[in-house]
Image: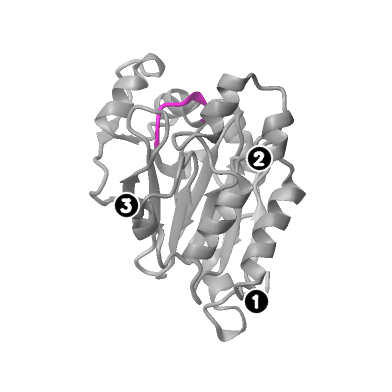
């Protein structure tokens, strides 16, 4: 399985996954043109995307879904509640497949397992994506709010994680947001801080976890090097030696071959990137 985060942050989120030359997007929070351009930098044709899995209705996850669905005939996979909340983005000509949390479905040869999260949206989910042929399992958990028992259970035993590390507590307090917005971000229905993400990552650590990409960083209340240091320090003391990266807002990550990374040095644990 291959993975790239096309971009992540408050101005847009989208993640590309694929196996055998077949691709899906989890969210498309950039304009259709931006998604096309970012896919092009990875040499992935947009008309090769076979589905867009929408996790919730917020614009930084949905901005391009209607345009891409109509322009390229890409099916949209959404919960009924998210579909209703996204009605202003759709014209009725799109192919929409409804799914429900707790029920897995197949797209482009991949198995997508959605599960409920705690976030201030109508019907928010996170997902795991599995490649049956390669055996890799990826967890994508952004806009997480807080890690419930169900979320912990759903993300256990993943080989790779895309995990929210939204803000630093001090930078949030000292930042430009009014108190009401600060309270929303820090609430149990908001976003994970660096320290909360570090604790959660430690809980999810197991010998087969090959790597983690930190995502949805606040441009105003976080710094990539700060998020990486907090999570790295927590994981290193727990024995993690895998890949730890940070997704940026304005450019995609590299397209990573997770099967190759898992098997590096003949081990499930990633020791080389």
Find the magenta span and give its range: 54-60
Query: Residue 36 appears at what percent x and percent y?
Result: 58, 34
Residue 217 quadrant = top right
Secondary structure at badge 3 equals: strand
Q: Residue at x 35, y 57 (%)?
A: 154
What distance separates the C-alpha of mark 3 from that of mark 1?
Answer: 28 Å
| Left or right of 109, for residue 159 | right
In front here: 191 or 84?
Answer: 191
In front here: 105 or 32?
Answer: 105
Secondary structure at badge 2 equals: helix
Mark 3, residue position: 113
Q: Point out the tag, 3 or 1, that comes first from the N-terminus.
A: 3
Mark 2, residue position: 169
Mark 1, residue position: 271
| Left or right of 228, for residue 26 | left
Q: Residue at x 55, y 78 (%)?
A: 263
What distance separates the C-alpha of mark 2 from that of mark 3?
Answer: 31 Å
């Amino acid at each position: 399985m291959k993975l790239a985060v096309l971009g992540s942050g408050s101005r847009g989120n989208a993640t590309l996954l694929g196996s055998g030359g077949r691709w899906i997007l989890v969210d498309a929070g950039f304009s259709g043109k931006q998604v096309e351009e970012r896919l092009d930098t990875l040499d992935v044709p947009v008309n090769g995307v076979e589905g867009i899995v929408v996790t919730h209705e917020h614009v930084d996850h949905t901005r391009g879904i209607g345009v891409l669905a109509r322009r390229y005939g890409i099916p949209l996979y959404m919960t009924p509640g998210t579909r209703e909340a996204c009605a202003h983005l759709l014209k009725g000509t799109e192919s929409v497949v409804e799914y429900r949390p707790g029920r897995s479905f197949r797209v482009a040869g991949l198995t997508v397992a959605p599960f409920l999260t705690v976030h201030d949206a109508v019907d928010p989910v996170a997902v795991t994506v599995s490649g049956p042929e390669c055996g890799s399992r990826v967890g994508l958990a952004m806009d997480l709010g807080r890690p419930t028992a169900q979320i912990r259970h759903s993300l256990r035993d993943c080989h790779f994680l895309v995990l929210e590390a939204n803000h630093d507590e001090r930078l949030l307090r000292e930042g430009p947001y009014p108190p009401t917005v600060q309270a929303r971000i820090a609430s149990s229905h908001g976003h994970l801080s660096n320290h909360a993400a570090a604790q959660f990552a430690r809980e999810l650590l197991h010998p087969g976890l090959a790597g983690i990409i930190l995502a949805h960083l606040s441009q105003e209340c976080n710094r990539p090097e700060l998020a990486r240091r907090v999570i790295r320090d927590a994981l290193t003391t727990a024995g993690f030696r895998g890949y730890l990266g940070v997704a940026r807002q304005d450019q995609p990550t590299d397209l990573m071959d997770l099967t190759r990374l898992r098997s590096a040095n003949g081990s499930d644990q990633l020791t080389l990137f």
